[in-house]
Image: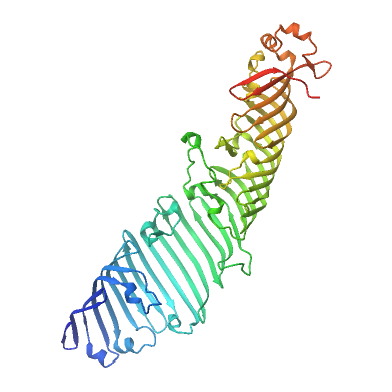
Amino acid sequence: MKATLKGHKAIIEKFKIQVGNSDVSISGKVSDLPAIIHHTDIPVQTDLKITSKFLDIEELTKTSDEVKGIDEQIENLSLGLKFLSSAKAMTESPNLPIGEFFIENLYAKLKHYPHTLHDFHADVFIKDENFKVVDFTGLIDKSDFHFSGQLENYDLWLDDKMNGDTKIDFDLTSKLLQFDNLFTYGGERFVPEDYRHEEVKNLKLHGSASLHFNHGLKSTDLELIQLEGNLKVHPLHFEKFSGRIHCQDDQLSVKKLKGTLGKSNFLADIEYFLGEGKGKKENFIYLSSARLDFDEIMKFQLPPSPKELDVKVNHDAVFSIYDFDFPDLHLKLDIAHLNYHHHLLDHFKSDIQVARNHTIHFNTFSFDAAGGHFDVKGYLSGSDKKHIYFKPDIRVKNVDLDKFMVKFENFGQDYLVSENLHGKFTGHITGKVHLHADLVPKLDDSELSIEMLVLNGRLENYAPIVALGEYFQDKNVNKVLFDTLSNTLTVKKSVLNIPKMTINSSLGFMEIRGTQHLENEMKMDYVIGVPWKMIGKVGGQKLFGKRKKEAEENEDEIQYRTKNAKFVYVKITGDIENYKIGLGKREK
């Protein structure tokens, strides 16, 4: 140590200390050393320059073999400190030293927080009970911040009993915040994967917090007054955020939390118990929104289909409902316009109850989409990992099948239906659908009943009809129009069963019945009845091995639907690529 005294001024030219692996060097000056010695009220200014090549925080904070220190290390620390106070205020204050304090040009590198802290500056006023940060600015790598705030009744934090109330008011602004710079510690990233490389520009945050102590922290109230800024990776502007948060005895309560994010807005109320077991109140989330664009918020892009990638999906090896714990939770949503994975849903309402044993009850799940309305009820059971299933009760009204696609398993891949059947669909779907762990249905182990009515529709490239193309004369079998299609279909073990149904179509009056496998080679077994007059001469020869006129005279081979209309029944068996056509019989 080397210091000199010039009048009342003390100059510290060099002060070095080594504690274990840690080193500290201090230089500076004190404007009036005698004033400090005599504890006077004379203002004193102290300027210090502190540097350190290495600080082992764990070693310095370890108090015993049983109590571990803070696991952190600091390299190349440098900063300037300035104190404007009096000796009496600094040494005789019952709490923190009273006065104005400055931090200048702080620079440091931390081991577990792999970023460089630099250009830190702070201006702090400390009084008997209040603590005010006039200005606190700095950079973490390329991220900058500007913080100001006030802490009232900080003195109770220094009391062993900790009784009373304290309030914090804060403002934070930033021109640029890079999440990679801020939310990584000890090799862990504390933000969702989609937002790990996000950047926020022109951030503004204002709020306040009230803390109630009763022999320790009893409750916390946080009021969010302003939050706005611009995201880069997810190119969104967010603004008008506000709300109140209360936490007491592990019970989290959020009231009127609202905001605007891009095209989306929301208003939420939340009750959630953060402790073990059940809380005194039901876990509850209520969310309402005039518009919620999930795809914009998450920057969603449709992934390539497995068919395009030429890979087979193992549905039990990707996302799984067992990747995370289910809470006991009551969820209510009321969203006027929802965009989710390119599905546009209007008047979306849901009332869902989730249980810890991986079950979900859909009390209400309704929305408008594809020109019609969906009303879904049922429950999903995942309590048995080997038997995950969904028991649906789905009512659909006036849905345009051209606008609606459903995902299911086919050839071990994901397949979109509604490629053959078009029109306005109304129906009632019930049954039991077994699911993979990623919630994709297993059709080979499911049962469904589908009461259906399709109006003003068409069948396009429907294999059983297309297969008869050469038997019809001057008819377009690739596009068959119809006015009404009504039936109750069943699906069991990947087999679609179609009871006899009659169709008034552009091919004429038809009857269709049969079965269709929904996996592997898509095997089919259909019987189609068509008016005899629709069969051409070539078709008649192929079916009966004779000219059409001769075939008409053979009544054993021709089925009559009515006394006045002759029908021929054609049987189609095989798959889409390889099939056989022969005479069938009318269903008795």
Judge by depth and name the residue closer to the eye, 364 or 487. Answer: 487
Question: Which residue is pictured at 76% across the width and 20% down the height?
Answer: 585
Question: Which residue is pictured at 38% across the width and 68% down the height?
Answer: 147
The answer to whether one can see residue 435 in this image is: yes
Residue 327 percent location from the top left of the image: 59, 60
Q: State whether residue 399 is above or below residue 263.
A: above
Judge by depth and name the residue closer to the eye, 461 or 168. Answer: 461
Is residue 180 rendered to the left or right of residue 257?
left
Is residue 279 rendered to the left or right of residue 65?
right
Is residue 481 rendered to the left or right of residue 89?
right
Q: State whether residue 123 is above or below residue 479.
A: below
Question: Which residue is pictured at 52% across the width and 52% down the height?
Answer: 264
Residue 386 percent location from the top left of the image: 61, 49
Q: State whether residue 487 is above or below residue 530.
A: below
Judge by depth and name the residue closer to the eye, 362 or 225. Answer: 362
Residue lying furthest bottom: 38
Residue lying furthest right: 563
Question: Which residue is pictured at 71% across the width and 22% down the height?
Answer: 528
Asked which quadrant contains residue 1, the reply is bottom left
Judge by depth and name the residue closer to the eye, 135 or 339. Answer: 339
Residue 24 percent location from the top left of the image: 24, 75
